[in-house]
Amino acid sequence: MPKAIKRIDPSSTPVVALEQRGFAKTLVKWQRAHGRHDLPWQKNLHPYPVWLSEVMLQQTQVSTVRAYFTKFMDRFPTVQDLAQAHEDEVMSLWSGLGYYSRGRNLHACAKRVVQDFNGAFPSELKDLIGLPGIGPSTGAAIASICFKKKEAIMDGNVARVLSRYLGYGGDLSQSAHQRMLHAFAKALLPRGGSDMPVYTQGIMDLGATVCTPKRVLCERCPVRSTCVAFAQHKVLELPFKSKKIKRTQKSIYWLIAMNDQAQVLGAKRGLEGIWAGMHAFPEFESETTLRQALPRDVVVRPLSVIKHELTHQSLSIHGFACLFKEQGARLRAQKKAQKPWDSALNLAGFEWMDMAHWARVGRPKPVADFLDQLDWLA
């Protein structure tokens, strides 16, 4: 068993002592015996499914990703299939998974792989991180798992494992300390490339199932005997970040308008801001402006408020449903007469979409949740 190590000083040279190299061997052995082996993307360690899973797993739990991964692989079994798909279909399958720029980048990346690399993912990290949506950590995961390259991933799980194991107290909200920890991660890699797929999966497994943020299972950790944080009773103090995410509170107001043909008014949002490129309802800054935009004889019913948590925002989404009778003739007449409510609603770009149409396009989860509340209008 490797000897206990000393606490790593953030200002020291990023070279890990020889006795620490047992970390990789221990982790590889542990992963083979106790790691996760039932994840659907582990059945085939080819670049396409590994890439797909890594993108989906960015800031998303494994339990959520399982079903989405299966849906995507069933519909798009190859990168060529994904590249040839229409963006609306891709985003429709992505709906509910969140961080929707990932879905658009996924589609763009598939096209680039087909166009620039003849449908074969490149094996070198420098080429991988040149593709849309693939950063250094995702690229390192693909290179190490699929091509046995000696590349170190550095996602949140790995940063937590290594900060605790090394006793690294550098402020990881600063890029200099992120780079230094990454240098240590490289030094801890297996000596040869043959163990890289198991090692990479092992360090991710350790962070996801044992060395977790709060309910830490140190008694199950294979490297506990040489873990500085465990020895110094500082497991929950690491990793250290001085800057915490500050969430702002925001309320938005959506008009969910249905016509007498059970169609709902919607449009594809622009490529900026929350839910960029997704389909949603007309949006207002307040309930007052929403109601003022409608004819006086239209009955508006408030729906249940939906709370939606984003990385930097807590949203309260207020939906107001209304039914337009004989909407076709009525709206054409309103528009022709240039009524104030028509300009306030800003119907340009909006269209009446039936439920089958809504199901075929990308839509944020709150949109789908409000659509489910519309039975009373039909």
Image (cartoon, helix red, strand yellow):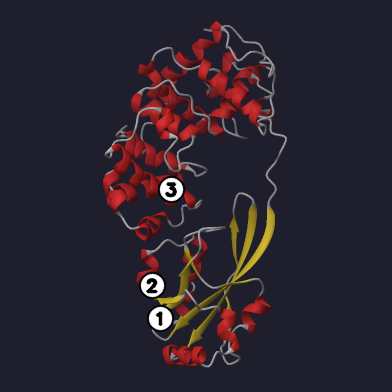
Q: Which residue lies at the image location 64% right of the left edge and 84% below the top edge? A: 292
- Does 177 sit left or right of 280 as displayed? right
Give the SS element for disc 1.
loop
Looking at the picture, which amino acid does disc 2 mark?
A: Met
Mark 2 vs 1: CB contact within 8 A: yes
**Mark 3 to mark 1 CA distance (whole Å):** 33 Å
- Residue at the disc numbered 1: 262
* Foreground of the two, 112 or 363: 112
Q: Residue furthest front?
A: 116
Q: Amino acid at mark 1?
A: Ala
Q: Residues within 10 Å of mark 3 (few under 14, many from 20)?
A: some
Lateral position of residue 63 relative to residue 50, left or right: right
Viewed as shown, does residue 250 lie left or right of 28? Answer: right
Above/below status of 73 relative to 122: below
Q: Position of residue 119 (x, y in %)?
A: 28, 40
Secondary structure of the residue carrying tag 2 is helix
Counting residues from the start of the chain, the first of labels 2 and 1 encountered is: 1
Mark 2 or mark 3: which is in front?
A: 3
Q: Which residue is mark 3?
A: 105
- Determine the CA span between mark 2 and mark 3: 26 Å
Q: Position of residue 289 (x, y in %)?
A: 66, 78
Task: Report the residue at 41% width, 34% height from top.
Answer: 128
Residue 285: x and y, percent?
A: 65, 71
Query: Mark 3 falls on what kind of element?
Result: helix
Q: Which residue does the image show at 47% across and 16% down from the upper left?
A: 24
Number of other residues with Cα within 10 Å of mark 1, as a class: few under 14, some 14 to 19, many 20 or more: some
Q: Which residue position holds label 2?
A: 355
Q: CA distance from mark 2 to mark 1?
A: 8 Å
